[in-house]
Image (spheres, helix red, strand yellow):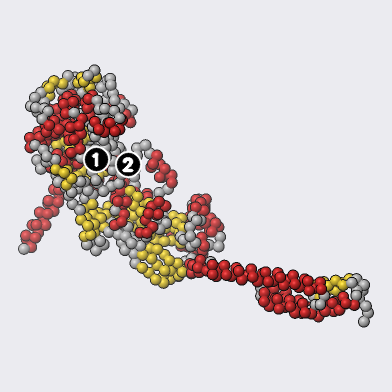
Amino acid sequence: MGRFPQRGRILAGRRAIYYNGSTRSGIACAGAFCSVKAWAKLRREISRCRPVEAMAALTEINKQDGAPELRRRAGLLYALLIIAFFGLVSRLIFLQIIQGERYTFLSENNRVRLKRVPGTRGMMFDRQGQLLVDSRPSFDLIFVPEDAYDPAKTLRLLAQYLRRDENELLKTFEESKSRAAFDEMVLGRDVDWPAVVAVESHQLDLPGVSLRTRPRRNYADGPMAAHVLGYLGEINQKQLNILKEQGYVVGDEIGQYGLERRWEELLRGKSGGQQVEVDALGRRVRVLHEVTDVPGYTVRLTLDRQMQEAAYEALKGKEGTIVALDVHSGAILTLASTPAFDPNVFARGIKSEEWSALIKDQLRPLSNRATQGQFPPGSTFKIIMAIAALEEGVINPESFIQDPGFFFFGNRSFRDWKKGGHGAVNFHRAIVESCDTYFYQLGPKLGIDRIAKWAHAFGLGEKTGIALDDERNGVIPDTEWKRKRYRQPWFPGETVSVAIGQGYVTVTPLQLANMMAAVANGGKLFRPYLVSKVESVDGTTVREYGPELIRTIELKPDTLNRVRNALADVVSGAHGTGGAARSQMVEIAGKTGTAQVIEMKSAYLKSEQLSYFNRDHAWFVSYAPVDHPEVAIAVLVEHGGHGGDAAAPMAKKVFEKFIELKKKATEKQEVQIEGETRAN
């Protein structure tokens, strides 16, 4: 056997061993040939990620390869394997112990999901049992990104199938990345039938995308009673922080306005749930366990749907409100406000541009003018002035004054609405013809504090307590009010303006309707209410509501008789300002009002000569029938001009609808009684 070359290398498997030609190096080289199998075993164990077996193979190599160079390299490899081993063990501890609960949750959610089933929201009916609000089945488009291999690709494909803007879907996805893993993301509410078909027919192409059946709120008459019924909206973070303990979660719908908000606790019901097994695409395989949801309570209202419809139709194209209530209980029969909004838009998920248009609309469709609008009452305030003057004894109702068409107080002239004046005027004629000059003179005689006392007695300047949010107070000024508000004394000349419902005084239409009811019923001021009964699904009465007397206003019989007779002649008298409310079906008593928006110091201008937003507000407050009052109505038409022209005819329509419904109910009752009599 010849000697090895002086210098060079030999290959052991794929490992090169360098030598210098010495005998000892030759022995090392021979050893290298002998360890080929051991090196192959080492490579095999490393490729299989088996650290213990790899170290054993390395030990075997170390025993066979005696060269110091090889020992050094083997030691280095030993160290690397030990580090890798401890790294692997550390990672296993982190995944299985520290993060074990999380990954167990993710693993379970990859197979088993908890599906929350919201309770069906309670229905609302009117006083005759006609449906106003219910819930119908709808489909929500749901996405769970964890079920999709490529969420962005899935959403782009979904947009293509639904013919929607993919950027819109991707934006929703990006905004929801902070949610918990496997939480459902709502891509669309109440999707239409073509979208349902598209999703169902492309399930294999859309992993993570599914449809969820959900009850959707349905408002049968759209905007007709929107300001009373209200609307739903997705719960916001502030609300969630407060209501989380009551079972609310992200994505829940909650009452945001009107009765939907005020009666949320009773209407919402209790959620149920399903434990569902899903496949790799997130599709339902079977239901493992189910907890049944509990529907919300049914709420019965005092509203009369047909009277509400008559009021809403009368107001169409106008900005205003009509409030009608039962004079003997305070039950609200009608509360219409225009312009209105369609709560069904909120039920299906209002778009940002739709919401922006609503809140920017200068006509304020979201505002409930009946409870939130604060307006100068104009000549309707003369009812308070008349009662105060008679009760305080500052006038003789039979005496006359001369009205030249103006009234001087100090160095200021106050004009009557009628150019040239009304001539000789007494108490009765002053109300019937709405003589400003007569009441100008009453103002200083009474003084602002006595006027305020009687206005407050009839509920003006204070909330009525109706179960609707954001009701306003209005303003009934007195000396103390001005001192606190402006840090100034009250000037007697300011009382002159207040005497005809101008100046600082403002009221809500609901307050005026309630005032008129108190005049009609003899001085009883009731709290207006909208809900008469709350029932469970099986019809069991849970709560019941009725009249709540706030106070009884002590009035002299003569005061009531004189005021009521004058109010009747406002409508039926030859010179009354409310003749447009005269009806063949029912005798109506009322008072017109024309409230100035801006002060006009010079000419007598007609309303149509002014720019729209500077035109006067039109009022008509009334009750009927005159002999046995049942209903009181307040009508306000913003920028409508004269109350007798714009507001009085609207009240007439609502009164006639009431009489028509009452007649039908009486006839129906008579038929039933006759049928029972024959049966017996």
| Residue at the image position 84 percent from the left and 77 percent from the top | 28
The vertical placement of 159 against 657, above or below, is below
Residue 460 visible in the shown view: yes
Task: Quadrant for residue 264, please give it.
Answer: bottom left
Quadrant for the N terminus in the image: bottom right
Give the side of residue 428 with respect to residue 34, left or right.
left
Q: CA distance from mark 2 to mark 1?
A: 19 Å
Is the residue under label 1 in contact with that under label 2 (CB below 8 Å)? Answer: no
| Residue at the image position 29 percent from the left and 25 percent from the top | 599
How would you rate the neighbour count of disc 1 (Cα within 10 Å): few for under 14, some for 14-19, many for 20 or more? some
Give the side of residue 47 with respect to residue 152, left or right.
right
Inspect the image, locate mark 1, and give the three-letter code of the amino acid beneath it.
Answer: Glu
The disc placed on residue 462 is 1
Q: Nearer the viewer, residue 320 or 586?
A: 320
How would you rate the neighbour count of disc 2 (Cα within 10 Å): few for under 14, some for 14-19, many for 20 or more? some
Inspect the image, locate mark 2, and give the three-letter code of the amino acid beneath it.
Answer: Ser
| Residue at the image position 24 percent from the left and 46 percent from the top | 466
Q: Nearer the viewer, mark 2 or mark 1?
A: 1
The vertical placement of 307 against 384, above or below, is below
Task: Quadrant for residue 569, please give it.
Answer: top left
Q: Which residue is mark 2?
A: 367
Mark 1 element type: loop
Q: Nearer the viewer, residue 542 or 659?
A: 542
x and y, in percent, of residue 236 in the image: 41, 51
The vertical placement of 676 against 428, above or below, is below
x and y, in percent, of residue 642 in the image: 23, 30
Q: Nearer the viewer, residue 312 or 15?
A: 15
Give the side of residue 5 with respect to residue 367, left or right.
right
| Residue at the image position 9 percent from the left and 40 percent from the top | 627
Residue 107 visible in the shown view: no
x and y, in percent, of residue 433 in the image: 16, 28
